[in-house]
């Protein structure tokens, strides 16, 4: 009995319950105002339990696919509910869950305006994300891909900050438009496969065997690439990101930066590089150039921001440039580096957004010129902020450095000049990170600052957990390097019986 | 025995973690005691290891591999420590000098509300330096390398209430980070060539000729860039004088035991690689020479006590780079040891003075202090004597003499056609020694002699006095472990760090030794004539009284003073920073304008399109019928014609 469907469905089901619970208790008292929050906590804990069970199960094949689920859906079209999990999906789901738990502990309780709907949307985004990480039927993948988009759009547009409508619209148009290109690519691939074999299927493993002409594979690859590039984001199509991250409520910012960007990287690994290895290697120089452009451009703009969330958002663009560079460096080393970088960035940037959100809750400003120094008033928050800013500048011994080093090593083998340019991004990383530290945390207190409360111990423990994870990732990344890698395309006999759905 | 090695690092690291985890519950004094104790324990562990060494219970090099850091096809890195004589010497310097500085800091920082954070950062600094010193894998060394950079940033900007302090801290980090990135590129180059960054394996590959000359020279130059930035050598020197913004114990730690010595240590550790890259050696020697002269000249015109010491550090590091450049890494290491003792002493003395004269740092506003603080005066004079390398009685003499004699014999080869002359370099280094004596005794005579201008208050507490005493003792007697052959055949240091090395002390003309001995005395004498004995003309405050400028009526000379005082490279760096900022602002604006234009145009097209479409849907049935007929007609026509 596979737990994968439960893993996917549980959050959204819990979300419905949270919504209903909130509706039924409308106005019955102050204590009940956070009923939907309690439901969300319970759901996430249950989900964690499920994931622990799932992680402890023996893998289907040694070092490869860990779990598998199959259910016919639209048989005429060859569409099925097919879920598969390997180390890569599992690690990314763990990352998602950890960050969602952190969000719930830190910020969603403060939401008082239609909290039920908020939690429903939040949890359905989680369903979309987990589904995206698991789906191996291309149609289902597309379904989940769009599923995580819509609730996120509403979250930004309804609960965001001053300029939320425009930011939400920008986010939606960019991701939706690029998603349609991906749909075209999916349909193209399916049709080519149908012409060749006479079997109409959306199955990932079946489609992987399709023979393609060089031009055809390049076009299809590009269709996927654009969709993932928008999500990652890659430099010319990153414009939605700073606005969306800045205007989104804290929870949505964390989910966006910590997890949603990773779906882009995940998609590139699974549906770009593994599905069209040949076209990807031909496209690699362009992609690597885009990666370097992202590293330098993102870091550069990040140096010039006054809005704390915008600064972190641009630093994400820079970090994701390393991911793109590593993925297309054409070696296993680069892929591993990119994956470590994704995990480390998810943790450190997610935590930074949590901290930025907490600052905004307390001093009601995101403008670093207005916030002033916080160390004297909030040493815990500031200490955590300094730690994650330092992680973000690529300090050796912390997670980001491990990823960046592996990416640079892989890049150096391909082209030393590219590696030197990418490494120059590390100097800029120091500039924006330390500017952040010296304007918000270790800075003179602004005159007339209101007294504020520091993080309570419970939240600090959670942040401490994230810090430990970042340190472990930085000092002992080997388990992740062998575990969190994509499995090969071929499936064992365990799954082959169900492969050809009627 | 092997298990003791990681402990050396673990003690200070544990202190850091405890101080930060306590979240302010461990306050000032107890945090200080905890930190000092941890560094002391580390020193004791080092002592046990050294005893094991001496007694032969441990054979070196002692390797401890903790865990494998990363492994990918064609490359692997480990977290591994190694102990050999060189790292043992460094452990001794870092932990013993570090311990004394921590002890001093308990007294110095007693009244500061943030002292827990201070001690947490200080022990982390020591821990990072120890990782750097002990690592047997260059990537592992890089953890410590960046770690000391981070800690220096945190400590220089410790008093964050003043934006100038945090700006100085950021400047230090940015400049060293540029070097770090160069070093990282060097590491990548070597990692690609040899599949590992194990120091032993790397040096073996060099001697076995497995690396191409291009890779060796390239990586050597990149590593050299990193080391130059860390050691504040030209052209990266401008961060170190600004780093004075931190608390004085921090300055002592940065200048003596950690941080700036890291570059020298790295080059000494990899001397095998650099020996195979002759151009890198020659560049190193030339930069060392240049730095030691420029920094000494600059120190001569400073009026801030701590800045004089900062420039003197840069100048002394120049001597070490010169020694490294002529292949005398043992001499560089020896000078590193003696320099650590007397520079820590000088800084701590300076801290004690500044604390008692109401945080006045301008030497022209001090004066006559010897009557109020004889103990500190004695300690400072001992430190100054060691820095100036007064013959026989100071440690600095022996180490500087070792460098000078090595430079005399050196022949750095830049290209086969262009060989730097050792004799010329020797002359420059000797001139540098004259300048050194001149500027430090200028400082001594202005601060401790003459009319008193401020009256010190308070007393120097014993926790601050004891480290001064210990360091003064070390500054006198550490030199005795190594002497020039003409004085006494004592070569304990070179035998210890380089037992396999050839006899390092061939006979040289005695007049070399004499020249090296007389020059500092002459310098001190001139200083006495100019600043000690003479009247108030040279003792007035130059900025307000116009003293120095009146003394320098010649325009070119004034220009020289200008550029040394205002530090031209520093200005250039600031200008580059400003230009970068301006460009990025321009890029921001251009980007915003482009997006705005695109959005505007899209909206416009949409609006115009709407107008057309609205015209079509005007609610009149005849228009609709017309459209249907037209469409039908067009479709039929198309079907017929195709």
Image (cartoon, coloured by chain):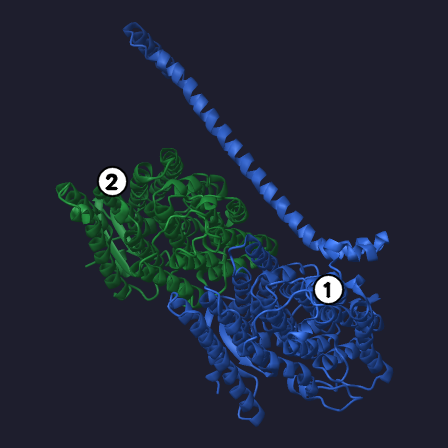
Does residue B10 show up? no
Circle 1 marks a residue in which chain?
Answer: B
Q: How many marks?
A: 2
Q: Is residue B478 above or below residue A33?
A: below
Q: Which residue is mark 1?
A: B299
Label 1 environment density (alpha carbons within 10 Å; few <14, some 14–19, many ≥20) = many
Q: Is residue B381 above or below residue B176?
A: below
Q: Which chain is green?
A: A
Q: Nearer the viewer, residue A134 or A346?
A: A346
Q: Is residue A320 above or below residue A184?
A: below
On screen, residue B535 versus residue A40, left or right, reads right
Chain B, chosen colour in render: blue
Whether residues under marks 2 and 1 lie with C-beta atoms below 8 angstroms apart, the answer is no
Circle 2 marks a residue in which chain?
Answer: A
Q: Residue at x 42, y 68 (%)?
A: A476
Q: Are marks 2 and 1 on the same chain?
A: no
Give percent across and percent down for residue A333: 48, 61
The secondary structure type at the circle numbered 2 is: loop
Q: Which residue is mark 2?
A: A113
Does residue A235 show up? yes
């Amino acid at each position: 009995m596979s737990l994968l469907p439960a893993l996917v469905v549980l959050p959204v089901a819990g979300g419905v319950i949270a919504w209903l619970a909130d509706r039924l208790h409308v106005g019955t008292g102050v204590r009940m105002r956070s009923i939907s929050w309690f439901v969300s906590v319970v759901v996430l804990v249950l989900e964690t339990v499920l994931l622990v069970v799932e992680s402890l199960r023996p893998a289907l094949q040694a070092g490869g696919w860990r779990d598998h689920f199959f259910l016919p859906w639209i048989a005429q079209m060859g569409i099925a509910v097919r879920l598969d999990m390997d180390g890569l999906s599992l690690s990314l789901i763990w990352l998602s869950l950890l960050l969602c738990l952190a969000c719930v502990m830190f910020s969603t309780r403060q939401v008082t305006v239609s909290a039920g709907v908020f939690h429903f949307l939040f949890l359905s985004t989680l369903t979309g994300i987990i589904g995206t990480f698991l789906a191996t039927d291309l149609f289902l993948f597309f379904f989940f891909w769009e599923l995580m988009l819509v609730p996120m759009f509403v979250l930004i547009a309804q609960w965001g900050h001053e300029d939320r409508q425009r930011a939400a619209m920008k986010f939606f148009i960019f991701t939706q438009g690029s998603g349609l290109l991906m749909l075209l690519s999916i349909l193209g691939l399916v049709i080519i496969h149908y012409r060749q074999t006479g079997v109409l299927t959306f199955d990932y493993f079946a489609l992987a065997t399709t023979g393609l002409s060089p031009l055809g594979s390049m076009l299809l690859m590009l269709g996927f690439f654009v969709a993932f590039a928008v999500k990652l984001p890659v430099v010319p199509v990153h414009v939605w990101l700073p606005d969306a991250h800045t205007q989104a409520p804290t929870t949505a910012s964390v989910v966006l930066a910590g997890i949603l960007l990773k779906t882009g990287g995940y998609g590139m690994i699974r549906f770009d590089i593994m599905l069209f290895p040949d076209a990807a290697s031909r496209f690699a120089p362009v992609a690597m150039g885009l990666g370097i452009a992202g590293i330098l451009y993102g870091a550069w703009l990040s140096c010039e921001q006054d809005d704390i969330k915008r600064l972190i958002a641009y630093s994400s663009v820079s970090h994701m440039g390393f991911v793109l560079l590593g993925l297309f460096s054409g070696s296993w080393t680069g892929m591993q580096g990119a994956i470590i970088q994704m995990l480390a960035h998810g943790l450190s940037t997610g935590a930074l957004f949590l901290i930025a959100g907490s600052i905004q809750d307390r001093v009601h400003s995101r403008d670093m010129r207005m916030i002033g120094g916080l160390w004297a008033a909030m040493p815990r928050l500031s200490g955590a902020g300094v730690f994650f800013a330092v992680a973000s500048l690529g300090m050796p011994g912390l997670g980001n450095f491990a990823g960046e080093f592996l990416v640079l090593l892989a890049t150096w083998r391909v082209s030393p000049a590219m590696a030197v340019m990418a490494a120059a991004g590390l100097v800029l990383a120091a500039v924006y990170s330390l500017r952040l530290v010296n304007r918000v945390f270790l800075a003179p207190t602004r005159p007339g600052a209101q007294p504020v409360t520091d993080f309570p111990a419970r939240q600090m423990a959670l942040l401490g957990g994230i810090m430990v994870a970042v340190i472990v990732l930085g000092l002992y990344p080997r388990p992740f390097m062998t575990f969190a890698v994509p499995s090969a395309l071929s499936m064992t006999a365990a799954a082959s019986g169900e492969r050809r759905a009627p | 025995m092997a298990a003791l090695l990681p402990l050396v690092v673990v003690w200070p690291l544990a202190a850091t973690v405890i101080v930060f985890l306590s979240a302010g519950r461990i306050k000032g004094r107890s945090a200080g005691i905890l930190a000092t104790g941890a560094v002391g324990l580390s020193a004791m562990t080092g002592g046990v290891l050294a005893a094991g060494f001496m007694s032969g219970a441990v054979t070196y090099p002692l390797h401890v591999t903790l865990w494998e850091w990363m492994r990918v096809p064609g490359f692997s890195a480990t977290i591994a420590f190694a102990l050999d004589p060189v790292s043992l010497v460094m452990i001794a310097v870092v932990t013993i000098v570090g311990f004394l500085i921590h002890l001093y800091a308990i007294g110095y920082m007693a009244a500061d509300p943030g002292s827990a954070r201070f001690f947490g950062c200080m022990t982390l600094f020591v821990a990072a330096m120890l990782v750097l010193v002990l690592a047997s894998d260059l990537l592992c060394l890089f953890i410590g390398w960046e770690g000391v950079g981070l800690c220096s940033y945190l400590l220089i900007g410790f008093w964050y209430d003043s934006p100038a302090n945090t700006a100085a801290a950021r400047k230090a980090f940015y400049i060293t980070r540029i070097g770090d990135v160069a070093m990282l590129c060097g590491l990548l180059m070597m990692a690609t060539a040899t599949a590992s960054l194990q120091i032993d394996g790397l040096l073996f590959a060099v001697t076995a000729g497995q690396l191409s000359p291009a890779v060796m020279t390239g990586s050597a130059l990149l590593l050299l860039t990193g080391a130059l930035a860390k050691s504040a050598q030209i052209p990266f020197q401008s961060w170190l004088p600004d780093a004075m913004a931190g608390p004085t114990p921090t300055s002592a730690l940065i200048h003596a035991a950690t941080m700036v010595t890291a570059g020298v240590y790295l080059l000494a550790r990899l001397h095998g690689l650099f020996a195979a890259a002759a151009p890198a050696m020659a560049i190193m020697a030339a930069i060392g020479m240049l730095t030691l002269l420029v920094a000494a000249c600059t120190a001569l015109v400073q009026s801030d006590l701590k800045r004089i010491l900062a420039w003197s550090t840069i100048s002394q590091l120049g001597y070490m780079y010169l020694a490294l450049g002529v292949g005398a890494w043992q001499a560089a290491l020896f000078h590193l040891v003696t320099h650590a003792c007397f520079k820590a002493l000088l800084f701590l003395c300076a801290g004690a003075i500044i604390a008692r004269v109401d945080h006045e740092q301008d030497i022209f506003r001090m004066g006559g202090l010897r009557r109020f603080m004889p103990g500190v005066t004695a300690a400072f004079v001992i430190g100054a004597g060691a820095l100036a390398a007064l013959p026989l009685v100071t440690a600095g003499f022996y180490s500087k003499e070792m460098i000078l004699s090595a430079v005399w014999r050196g022949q750095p080869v830049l290209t086969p056609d262009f060989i730097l002359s050792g004799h010329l370099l020797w002359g420059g280094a000797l001139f540098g020694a004259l300048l050194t004596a001149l500027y430090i005794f200028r400082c001594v005579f202005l601060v401790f002699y003459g009319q008193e201008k401020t009256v010190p208050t308070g007393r120097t507490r014993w926790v601050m006095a004891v480290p001064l005493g210990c360091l003064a003792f070390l500054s006198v007697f550490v030199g005795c472990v190594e002497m020039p052959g003409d004085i006494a055949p004592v070569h304990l240091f070179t035998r210890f760090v380089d037992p396999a090395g050839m006899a390092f002390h061939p006979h040289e003309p005695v007049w070399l030794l004499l020249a090296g001995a007389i020059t500092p005395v002459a310098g001190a004498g001139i200083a006495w004539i100019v600043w000690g004995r003479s009247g108030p003309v040279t003792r007035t405050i130059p900025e307000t009284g116009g003293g120095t400028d009146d003394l320098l009526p010649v325009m070119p000379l004034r220009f020289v003073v200008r550029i040394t005082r205002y530090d031209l490279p520093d200005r250039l760096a600031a200008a580059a920073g400003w230009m970068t900022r301006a460009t990025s602002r321009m890029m921001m604006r251009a980007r915003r304008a482009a997006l705005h234009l695109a959005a505007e145009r899209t909206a416009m097209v949409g609006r115009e399109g709407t107008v057309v479409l609205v015209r079509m849907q005007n609610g009149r049935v005849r228009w609709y019928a017309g459209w249907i007929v037209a469409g039908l007609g067009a479709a039929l026509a198309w079907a017929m014609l195709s």
